[in-house]
Image (cartoon, rainbow, N blue to C red):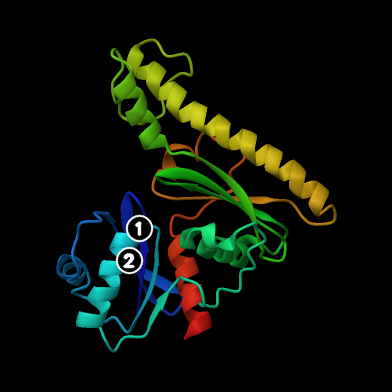
Amino acid sequence: MLLTIDVGNTNTVLGIFEDDAMLKSWRVKTDPRDTADELWVRFTSLLANFQVDAIAICSTVPASLRELRTMISEYFPTLPTTIIEPGVKTGVPLLVDNPKEIGADRIVNTLAAHTLYGESGPCIVVDFGTSTNLDVVSPKGEFLGGALAAGIEISVEALAARAAQLRRVELVKPKNVIGKNTVEALQSGTIYGFAGQVDGLVNRISDELAKLYPDSGQVSVIATGGLAPLVIGVSETIDFHEPDLTLIGLRLVHERNS
């Protein structure tokens, strides 16, 4: 069985694969202060019922990645391990000014999106996490770049911190766009506001893709990330929801390197 680990700034997502099938996934908080021993205790408690034969990792948190390397060397020294970093074969050409700037999660998302949805044309991956990332994939599976925006939760937290009469509210879809009280107004501005932001960016990106690839098929828009469920029922441009897109991408990269 393959253990996939996606370390994000807010959450770490783990998944167990047997061949192509995901058997189980978990979402835990990311704490850069966790030591290798603490990570081992946490992971082994989750994996008690599974026999791990290999590991694939991507991380946007350098401190956590360092401790993961230590954990693997101490507790899993014989397991084949794939870490998304320079030198690893991903099969994803990075057509950007500085490829070293691109996060590992965006690379594996590109591979997974093209593999799952790219037969008909280009793709746009909308990853709702600490930041909202829109990653653009060519019809050939190339990473073309994208757009980055502040994430939903940190935007709400910043608003509550800076506005004396506003506060954090439960992030759910309100009954109406026109809020009748402060809570509903905040929910409307957050949910519909971020959906409108995504739809606007997707439409503009799609226009550029149509000029770049006039003979390609329709653009597929895939939502992923922990906060995606807040927006997918409101957005007008999202076609698919794949919550495990990054983990699937990690499995695909591991297969290329094993």
Percent position of residue 126, x then y: 54, 47
In this rendering, position of residue 146 left or right of residue 158: right
> Can I make out residue 62 in this image?
yes
Picture residue at 32% right of the left edge, 66% below the top: 65
Amino acid type at image mark 2: Leu
Percent position of residue 233, x then y: 50, 37
Q: Which of 252 and 83 is in front in this view?
A: 83
Percent position of residue 210, x then y: 79, 48
Q: What element carries label 1?
A: loop
Q: What element carries label 2?
A: helix
> Can I make out residue 236 in this image?
no
Q: Could you say which quadrant of the image residue 99 lies in?
A: bottom right
Q: Could you say which quadrant of the image residue 107 lies in?
A: bottom right
Label 2 Cα neighbours within 10 Å, binned few <14 / some 14-19 / many ≥20: some
Disc ID at residue 65: 2
Label 1 Cα neighbours within 10 Å, binned few <14 / some 14-19 / many ≥20: some
Q: Which of 246 and 237 is in front in this view?
A: 246
- Circles 1 and 2 in contact, beta carbons < 8 Å: yes
Picture residue at 51% right of the left edge, 77% below the top: 88
Amino acid type at image mark 1: Val
Disc ID at residue 61: 1
